[in-house]
Amino acid sequence: MSSDQFPFPVAISRLSKGETSREPQNVRAINWLLDQPGGPVVVVTPRRQFDGDSLKRLLTQPGVLHLTWRGFATGSLDGRRVAYAWPDRKHLHDLWGVEADALTVIEWNEEETAEWVGDANPVQLLQGRTVQETSAAQMMDTPVPLPNGVEGILEYVAGMAAGYSTGLKWNEEDKLMADMMNRPERWVPITVEQVRAKCRALGMRPNDIDTIAGFLQRRKDGRRFIVRSSYRTFRFN
């Protein structure tokens, strides 16, 4: 199963109810990955040292590469079949745009993977069964249009971010912060959750969504922004 953001086979291996060891979870991930066609296998772990006999055995196989978070670059996953062990939310977000042949995530914490599961719509590998279903995020209704011109602002920002390989640029960030400061009444009725939903519907990168939602949350918390002089008085029409 795949999604627009991950146009290749994707799975997540989850600890099933009653399992007291993570080894069966690891084995499910490995078996699924090896069944997928594609290039060489790479295993990504947070650190060089880890627990997991099945993963360690996999790393002894010829041609299998071991990477850790230190110095990690997502481009090293392109053209490979990837076993990603115990990633947190940030490292999952960083997978945006990767061109792997297949990806299986070994989950440690459901809270860390929840948003990624909504984006990637992975096959769920459980004890004795697999679940292939459309994610809750994909089944959601189209977000309600946002008032006060916020709908158009987010569409503009999403369009600009899509034009850059690295996502949102500093000048677009400054425009958003300046508008939130100079037109506070525009943003008062808008919730952080609405902004997240709209940005997701627009296909924005997860890290960019976090940035925009973070700006709004900070304003709602009473924080002020320091904006570069060229945009200090900026307001969206």
Image (cartoon, grey):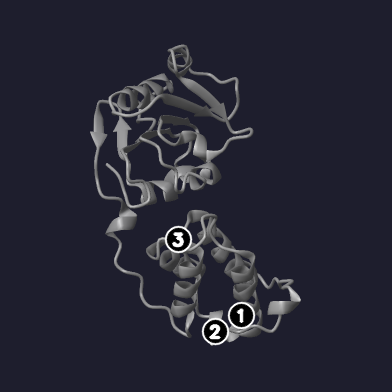
Depth order, front residue of 67/226: 67
Q: CA distance from mark 1 to mark 3?
A: 20 Å
Q: Which residue is mark 2?
A: 186
Give the percent coordinates (x, y) of residue 126. 31, 31
Q: Amino acid at mark 3?
A: Met
The residue to which callout 3 is attached is: 204
**Are the residues tagged 1 and 2 within 8 Å (C-beta)?**
yes
Spatial distance from mark 1 to mark 2, Cα to Cα?
9 Å
Q: Residue at x 56, y 38 (%)?
A: 73
Q: How many marks?
A: 3
Dot 1 or dot 3: first in sequence order is 1
Select label 1 or label 2 by which is in front: 1
Q: Which label lies toward us, 2 or 3?
A: 3
Task: List x then y, in percent, for residue 43.
Answer: 47, 26
Where does the image place residue 237, in percent across and percent down from the top left? 53, 88
Q: Decide which of tag 2 and tag 3 comes sooner along the chain.
A: 2
How many neighbours does mark 1 have within 10 angstroms: few (below 14), some (14-19), or many (20 or more)?
many
Residue at left offset 49%, top offset 43% = 92
Residue 87 is at least partly visible in this image: no
- Residue 10, horizontal then vertical, whole percent: 34, 38
Near mark 2 (Cα within 10 A), the count class, few <14, some 14-19 or many ≥20, is some
Reading the image, the residue beneath label 1 is 179
Q: Tag 3, which secondary structure?
A: loop
